[in-house]
Image: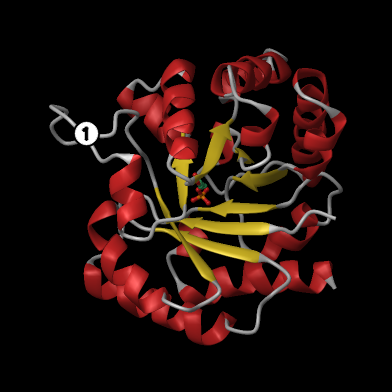
Amino acid sequence: MRKPIIAGNWKLNNTEKEAVDLVTALRNNLNNVTEVDIVVCPVFTVLPVVHDVLLESNIGLGAQNVFWEDFGAFTGEISAPLLKDIGVQYVIIGHSERRQYFGETDEMVNKRTKAALAHGLIPIVCVGEVLAQREENKTFDVIQIQCEGAFAGLTVAEMEKIVIAYEPVWAIGTGKTATPGQAQEVHKFIRGLLAKLYDENISQTIRIQYGGSVKPENSAELMSQPDIDGALVGGASLKAEPFIGIIQNSCSLAQ
Ligand code: 13P
C-alpha cells in the first residue's frame, strides 16, 4: 500500500510573513494527519523560517530546485549540501516551468536528481506533455523520453527513494484538470515503464503524484484512481483552507 504524498509547490510566491502565517495554519490544523505525507516547497529565501515553524511537526520541507555541483564558482546557484544543511528534505526537480523558461533538459534533470540523492534529499521529479504533444498522440512517447532521461544511471536502491509527479503542462495554472481517466492512464503507463526499466517491485512501490489545477473540488476523484498517489499542488497550496481540504479528502480515501 503506497502512502499518498501531497506537496504544495508555492512557486515564486509568499513573503516571509505570508509564509510563516500559512505554515502556522497548516501545522495547527494538520497535526493529527498520519495517513498522508505532507510537504511544502517555499522559495529558497524563506526555507529557514518555514523550517523553524515546522520543527517537530508532521509536515516536510522541500525546495523547488537544486544545482548538481556541491560548491564552487557557480554564481546564483543553490546546492544539495546547502539545502540539507538547513533541514530541507525534498526537492522538486524538472518542473515544466523550469523546462519552459530556463531551458532545463532531461540531462540536467538527471544531474540534479543524482545530486539530490547523493545528499539524502528526496527528489520529486516532474514529467508531463504540452498540449500540442497530447493532441498529436505523443503523450506516452514524451513521458517515456523524460523518464528515461531523468532516471538514466540510477540504481534500484536510488529509484526507491524517488517521487514522480505527472503534471500535464496544459493543466498547470489553467483551471483545466486532466480527467481522472486521462491522469490514471498516464500514471499506469509510467508504472509499466518502471517495471520494464527496473523491476515490478519499484513500479509498485514508487509514488506518482498528479499535478495540474488540483483543488478540493476535484482532488478526491483524482486520488481515488488506483495509480495516483497524491498531488503536487500549485495555486491551491497558497492558502491554508484549500490545501487542508485536499489533504483531508486524501485522508478520508486512505481510511
Ligand atoms: P496549479 O495547481 O496552480 O495548476 O500548479 C500545478 C503545479 O505546477 C504544481 O507543481
Residue 125, image quadrant: top right
> Relative to residue 10, is residue 248 drawn left or right?
right
Q: Residue at x 28, y 48 (%)?
A: 82
Residue 138 versus residue 248 in the image, above or below: above
Q: Residue at x 75, y 59 (%)?
A: 3
Task: Identify residue type, mark 1.
Answer: Phe
Does residue 129 appear in the picture of this structure? Answer: yes
Quarter of the image that includes the N terminus: bottom right
Are there few (<14), some (14-19), or many (20+) residues within 10 Å of tag 1?
few
Label 1 within 8 A of ligand 1 by Cβ: no
Q: Residue at x 66, y 45 (%)?
A: 210
> Relative to residue 8, is residue 30 drawn left or right?
right
The residue pinned by badge 1 equals: 71
Does residue 173 appear in the picture of this structure? Answer: no
Along the line of sight, which residue is nearer the eye, 73 or 208? 73
Quarter of the image that includes the C terminus: bottom right
Residue 171 versus residue 42 in the image, above or below: above
Q: How many marks?
A: 1
Q: Residue at x 64, y 67 (%)?
A: 246
The location of residue 164, given as percent across then percent down, is 63, 39
The location of residue 38, given as percent across then percent down, is 58, 65
Q: Secondary structure at mark 1?
A: loop
Along the line of sight, which residue is nearer the eye, 5 or 17? 5
The location of residue 29, given as percent across then percent down, is 55, 85
What colour scheme does the image use?
Answer: secondary structure
> Relative to residue 245, is residue 15 drawn left or right?
left
